[in-house]
Image: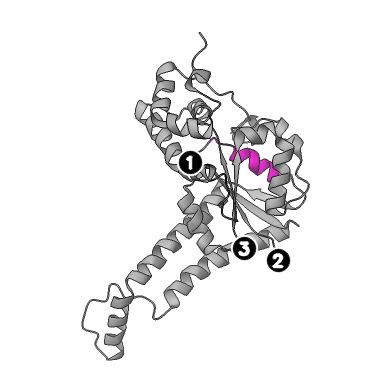
Amino acid sequence: MTANPILVSSPTPRSGTTLVQRLITSSDNGICYGEFCGRRIVELCEFAHKELVAVQNNRERQEYEWDNIFQGNHDYWMVGLDLPGEFPGHALVGAVQFYKQNYDEATRAIDKEIWAAKVPKIAFRDVVKTSDLISDLKCIYIYRNIYDVIKSQKTRGWFERESDLVKACEEWLANTEVIAALKRAAFQNQPTMLHVVQYEDLTENLQDNIEQIEAFTGLSGIKPEVADTKVNTWKPTSRENLEPRVSYEAPQGLARHECELIDKICGERMRELYPELSMEDFLPKN
């Protein structure tokens, strides 16, 4: 039997999930699958959760329709007819469990005990929905200051217009609310299935954070030297040669108007999460 699965996620992309993935995969007993695997299982849980709510809301109509059928009345439109009784809910929950079972079996097949999956961006409410259906799930939620997030996203060419930058800032603001709430309570009320990591603290105090991650997850033997190599992109050398041509691109700087817009949207949250930082720290030096 595999140990508790782990969801590795963050409020927004370019926050450090790749580093956490690489650290987990370097361990003696764990593997962290990539974004395709992670997104599939989150979206499957999202679908199942939505449909379970729909099944519950439709229960009265279902009882009426099945009563008609059992009485021999077939002369009406049965577009909403679902499986009888508890079978719809069992089918949805069972689909998630079967999917997880295959993750478990795949992990055992490579002689690992713990699997994780990386999802670079997820709202915490979706973490909760996923854990509702995978009851033993644990989540490592890593966050990073918005200025460095935007610098990294800008390097990838994600901002064609100002509205793209606004959207990225609003996403970070919305998805860090749970972190801010936990910080206000000195992380005393943190759910047992959640481990929050600040990217800057992870890189500055790597060994301490590795020990905390191992204690939280049951992983062992994480290799700290993995963090010595910077990786933030992947480009194959050619179509025939999949060896990466580039594994790291230095983040671009921010223009003054970009810093001012970031501060306008995210400044209050930044002062709460990063009181030691200010907009001036990220302004152009020239």
Earlier-in-chain disc, 2 versus 3: 2
Q: CA distance from mark 2 to mark 1?
A: 34 Å
Numbered mark located on residue 270 in the image: none
Residue shown at 48% from the left, 21% from the top: 279
Boundaries of the magenta span: 14-24
Whether the magenta-drawn stretch holds residue 201 is answered as no
Residue extending farthest to the bottom is 71
Three-letter code, disc 3:
Asn
* Mark toward the start of the polypeptide (3 vs 1): 3
What's the amino acid at mark 2?
A: Met
The answer to which of 107 and 21 lies nearer the viewer is 21
Residue 102: which numbered mark, if any?
A: 3
Residue at the spot of label 2 = 1
Q: Is residue 268 left or right of residue 225?
A: left
Estimate the x, y position of residue 5 in percent, counting from the top left. Answer: 63, 57
Identify residue type, mark 1: Thr
Q: Which residue is mark 1?
A: 176
Quote the CA–CA distance across marks 2 and 3. 12 Å
Residue 173, can we see it? yes
Of 205 and 13, the residue lying toward us: 205
Q: Earlier in the sequence, mark 2 or mark 1?
A: 2
